[in-house]
Amino acid sequence: MSSRAVTPETATPAPALNDRALGWLRYIWDKATTPDDWSDQGEPLPWWDRYTAPPLCSFPRFDVHNMAYVLPVMLESTPAWREVYTRIADELVRRYTSFWGAVDWCTLIGPDPGADRYPPAWQAFIPEPLRGRYPVPGWTGNGIEPWGLQPDPCGADGNVFYRGWLNVVLGIRHYVSGEATEHRPFEITGYQSRTFTWTHARIAEFISAQFRSRPQGPHCENTKIWPFCVSATGLGLKLYDALLGTDLSEPVPRWFDYVRRHYMSLTRSGELRTFALYYDPIEQRLHSLPGPSVAHGVFPCLLYMYPQDREFSLWIYELAMRRLGWLDPGLPLSRLRADPNHLSTALWMAHETGDTATEDRIRDYVEREYQPRFFGEENDRFGFWFGYDSTWPRGQINAILMLVESGTPGAWWRIFNEPLPASASEPRLKGVDYPALGIRRARNDMVHGALDIETTAATPSRRGTPTRFTVDRLPAPAEVSVIVDGRDSAAWHVTGGDSIQLDLDIDDHTIRVAFPGDGSQ
């Protein structure tokens, strides 16, 4: 397996969004924009995934933050069209900060009274000496001493997986919108529906202070410290710094060093022996899965660790792949019938790093076994079913695969290390009639003074019907030329001092809006 990492220099240009990516975008648009009630008097609609990976991740908040990841990846194909991603991100933030966003912190109070009655499948998540008296992962235990009851889910000593992923979602919202709203206050719903005022900046500063004071990492459930959650929390800080030029992630590399020294170990032959699912500082006990299953502690962390520490992530990725035998080309593919999140992450990691041999091998299996299909009344939504008998594709386990469908190698790393600038002077699309009209590609070529657009009928039944959209931030709108499908078009007019309106039909079109100047405006 190649360990060559894709860098901005070796990455291929972002293509237009393919049909699968467009189908997933349509589905997450449906989920985000369809009203439902996430207050303590309501309940999320059933397509929000609170079914996957019980008891750890079976809360709708996990679907919310996983759903956000694909937005900045898709933006590489359409940096001049951001409004659909911004709308989705706004709806995700609204749900995340609701009662159901923190339902576990607000309702799983104190010690778990059912700790002695867990089903056998859950016992693997608990150290054997503690079984029968120790809370299973997923039981947040708000109120457990020495911290006591903390009504604010964002400002608690623990619950880092709540504020850590909220910080990621807020950073993604900033990234796709290009709007710096880090000081804009918003309300978070906590215990007994009390509300607490926060800003993006305050959350990032609070997280940074926790990293500085806790070298082992902040805890999630009282009292478990998860590399999975802490690495995601660090990634949110890295994005915050990349967007705002701060240095709040400065203490995070010291936590990575702590992981190397305390949360993992190798055998004498160099195989992965332990990797912490979590560490309990009260019990002073690290819990790692036994045997080859130890590798399954690695995969959930890779998405979050890779943009922060590429060398370390590639190393533990290869350790995990070797421990499971997934590098052996003679391995019967039936043995890959593992947690689909982990195999999907292995596929994503191979894709992200340009390891085409491993990517092709796993992709063949995914295409055969994970049930990719278009769905909906017009067959215009897309997802993977993974063998589940469900009405809707599960959001949590689709999220990783859709990164592979939606971006080129290195796309995820670039978001956090080479973020796309959101220029206030470059032309952009506004007022697109989505989801009737879809945008596969919208990119400016500022060197040659042109905006290149590819459209499609995102809703097939609307194909051929009239539509229009605006291009603004043009330096001299009266002097532009518009080419549609290789021919000069007159179906546009100036609508303002920096804008034009294009009139066309909903269909597959290639459009070039050429504007004067060399892009140095």
Image (cartoon, rainbow, N blue to C red):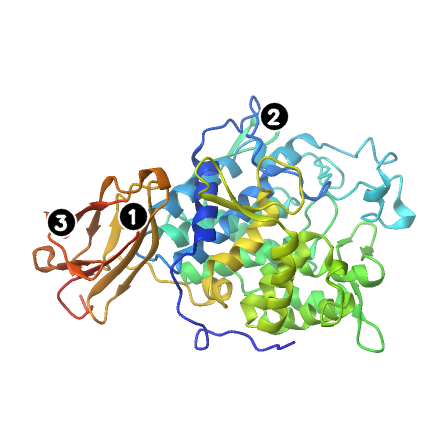
Which kind of residue does numbered mark 2 sit on? Gln
Whole-angstrom CA distance, mark 2 to mark 3, is: 57 Å
**Residue 308, can we see it?**
no
User: Which type of secondary structure does the marked residue at label 2 adopt?
Assistant: helix
219 relative position to 485: left or right? right
Query: Which one is closest to the eye, mark 1 or mark 2?
Result: 1
Which kind of residue does numbered mark 3 sit on? Ala
Q: In this picture, is 189 found above or below 409?
A: above
- Mark seen at residue 192: 2
Quadrant, the N terminus: bottom right
Residue with the mark numbered 3: 491
95 relative position to 454: left or right? right
Whole-angstrom CA distance, mark 1 to mark 2, is: 50 Å
User: Which type of secondary structure does the marked residue at label 3 adopt?
Assistant: loop
Q: In terms of image quadrants, where is residue 104?
A: top right
Could you tell me if the residues under marks 1 and 2 are in contact, i.e. CB atoms within 8 Å? no
Q: In terms of image quadrants, where is residue 335?
A: bottom right
Residue with the mark numbered 1: 507
Please tell me which of labels 1 and 2 falls first in the chain: 2
